[in-house]
Image: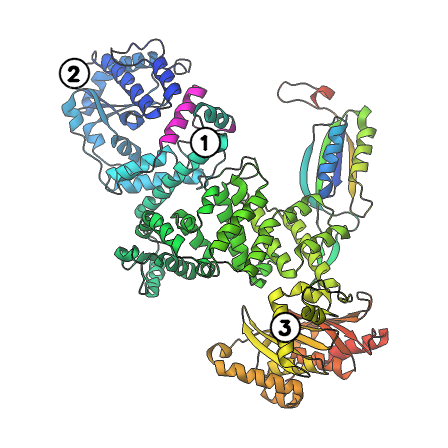
Amino acid sequence: MGIAANPLSNTAQPESGVLAEPEIRERFFATRDAAAALTLRSQLVDSVVRERWSWMPAGLAIAAVGGYGRRELFPFSDVDLLIITPTDHSEAAIKDPLAMCLRDLWDKGLRISQSVHTVADCNQIDPANAELAVSLLDRRFLAGDQGLFDQIKDPRPELGKNIAQLTKERHTRFQDTIYHLEPNVKDAPGGLRDLQVLRWFARLGAGDAAALPDSKVLFEIRCFLHYLAARDDNKLSFERQDEIAQLSGAASPEDLMRRYYRAVRSIAHLANRRLDRFEAKRSTLFAQFRDRTGRLSNSDFSIVHGEVLFRAPASLAADPGIFLRLFDFIAHHDLPLAPDTEERLEQSAGTFQFWAESHQPHWPAFRNILRQRAASRALRAMHDTGILEALFPELREMEALVIRDFYHRYTVDEHTLVAIQNVFSLKAKSKDMFGDLANETEDLDLLVAALLFHDVGKGDPGEAHVAVSRRIANEALHRAGMGEREWSVVSFLIGSHLEMSAAMNGRDLSDPSTIREMAAKVGTVERLRLLTLLTWADISAVNPSAMTPWRSQLLWKLYSQTYDELTRELSARIQKPEAASNPALAKFLEGLPPRYIRTHSEAEIAEHLRLEREGGYRGISVTLTKSAAWVMTIVASDRPYLFAAAAAALSSFGFNILKAEAFSNARGTAIDTFAFADTTRNLDQNPADREEVLTVVKRAIKGEITAEQLFKRRPKVKPDPHAVAASKVSFDNEACSTATLIQMIAQDRPGLLYDVVSVISRRGANIEVVLVDTEARKAIDVFYVTKAGNKLSAQEAQDLAAAITASLKPVG
Amino acid sequence: MKKIEAIVQPFKLEEVKEALKNIGIDGMTISEVRGHGRQKGHKEVYRGQEYNVDLLPKVKFELVVPSTRLDEVLDTITSAARSGRIGDGKIFVYDVAEAIRIRNGDRGESAV
């Protein structure tokens, strides 16, 4: 296409007053005014076409359509021409003169793309040729019979459906994302074609053409692309990003791309919203479900067709706090915002920011949003409408920020939201190792807060982003009223968010020193869990295939080995606790295994100390709290059967013990915790029964109620013939230097723990530590057992294991 | 010409790459692979439950070198990849019949 490669440069002689191509190009490179260049080019082509058309026979008309019709003729775009004939009969008569005309125009350097139609063709919507109807939306009379041209009618609004269909197909070709590293500025979602779709929709009555997002940068980039490549090339490759950044005066290629993404994002957002209006009706089942959600409406919000609307939009200004309630509502019910709601939020983001600045703290309300099941949906909606950035203006630093490497697929804000989404999708996974972690942690809200800020420092070119991110988060979250305990977790997570991936990729995971170092860095099991989840979510959000089974396995290995390291040192007793600043605390910690410190937060330890004091000499303090499950904490002077009695008392109520731990310190205080499930939700509904539970547990520990009396209350369980077959009891005398490990895997049932523990106690053995866990209705219990302060002999251990096996038979 | 296939521990990737670069070997293909050798994976215990890890993550280097440089390259890889523990990996050497540079049709060692 030698001619097209040199458009209009030599042969086309413009009329006076019309600029020639080399001058248009020169002017564009000097001013970067793409709109002016495109208009000038259209004028130039108009003059060439009109001049040649004057030689054509009468009775025909020629019109400009497509981009040329809009006077947006890019340097190497096709010149779309529509030739209108009165009837089919006349077409044959004009064939020869028309062929000569088009050939001449081609020879003048125009890349012609023509179609010949009768008026009747043009006025008929043919689903098979929607493209003709669409192109007619941009028709512009050039020359010939104006009367003929005027007979073409505007297409009917139904055309919107065809446009929506074509647009969706095009978006699918680009994986429905605007975040391509080397995007096609014309066809990719949010590109110039989408802008055009929005204009067409406006012509068809949907939306306002005057209120379209600013797209100047897209015109400028595409114009540069054409001139630089000297062909119709719309792909913004890395090389072109460098060249155009320089030519357009951008500070850097990243800066150029930031402007690009900002523009396409608002276009794509608006286009998707409009597309939904034209979407074909979905199934009736879906409609039924959708309409049922209407019942969730409350005094603030109504739900119409499954979308959330404000009940009183006019009162938004008076009560901006309703914004946070709105996102709490959608996070709770997992519902989308109605387009009207989104538009109102966008318009009020400024007002909201002004209100938010003077109505701190927002952390409690924001944390409630993060704790809901659809929190990631709510965060995305907050980001899309600018409310998130109004709440935390610091987050604007990462908006549309490009990290330029071949590994990252998304801009930083998108990466962040995808990472948060990943955390919630993990939570929904069952039978997944990482999914279990997500369900075990109680600080998911803090993990999400850390993810929200973990890369925010990437906008700062000067420093390593980890430190900057932490500094920004510190300011933003403290301003919002986050407490110190919460901040210490978030600060740790942001500060360490690269540690695990660095160890995975660069350290020998079989080397004990690697694992010891990691254990020292994380300090507690809960922090290890959170950091593992953060690492998983972060890597998975780099691009859709970044979390390969290969990486996942390395991360799991690092997690499980560090977990073992943190929980392993049961034999080592704390001699000189580091918390020496508080003498009372130091005294309390003496003799407890490091595992105790690593598996309990500072707040929990402080609470245990308080309970010990409250109980006094030979006292018993018992508390009951509710988090993910009910948790009973007993702090009491150690005595025989303490753990067994408590376990029996709990199971007498029909509670299912999920986890239990027992510790004791040097001065003989036992700290036992039981996490249990109350499947009948009795404790939730009858607060008075909580007192009853506490009383029964205390009396059982004191020996005022015997196990037999408790058994009478216990709900009967149907014997399961497979239970014994599935169980396995083993012992290990090597793993720990001071105690014998008895490990048991058995079908779980109410009262199981009591039965096993009383077997151990009856044999005169002392339970030092017990770790109880339940997975998939299987109890996995490990007991650290001693007799008279020493390990059991091999024979004793074997007998004990056999006795436990015998006791596993369910009580019928 | 010889083709060298070296399967090494993931954390040795940078070290091996660097060592090869230092003796002037620039061309190589690296892939993330999973597999097991004679140990057939191993058992790991997590929360008292044993589970089998039968496919272990490794990194595979593939490179073609002139026969005259074979020993030097093998020594370099071996010393860079060695930690002395089980699972350090394996190296395989193959004869290469021909090498062709697709762009210009160059053949033989100059194409490598």
- Crowd rating for badge 1 (residues with CA inside 10 Å; few <14, some 14–19, many 20+): many
Residue at 67 percent across and 18 percent down: it is B106
- Crowd rating for badge 3 (residues with CA inside 10 Å; few <14, some 14–19, many 20+): many
Residue at 83 percent across and 45 percent down: it is B84
Q: Is residue A741 left or right of residue A361?
A: right
Amino acid type at circle 2 is: Ala
Location of residue A12 with respect to A784 vertically, above or below: above
Which residue carries the number 2 mark? A58
Asked if residue A227 is among those painted magenta in the image, a careful observer would answer: yes
Which residue carries the number 1 mark? A256
**Which of these two is toward me, A320 or A33?**
A320
Q: Position of residue A603 (x, y in %)?
A: 60, 66
Q: Is residue A413 visible?
A: yes
Q: Is residue A715 visible?
A: no
The dot on residue A380 is: none
Q: Position of residue A40 (x, y in %)?
A: 30, 19
Residue at 51 percent across and 58 percent down: it is A482
Q: Position of residue A608 (x, y in %)?
A: 63, 73
Q: What's the coloring here? A: rainbow
Amino acid type at circle 1 is: Leu
Q: Are marks 3 and 2 on the same chain?
A: yes
Which residue carries the number 3 mark? A608
**Which of these two is toward me, A34 or A109?**
A34
Q: Position of residue A115 (x, y in %)?
A: 28, 24
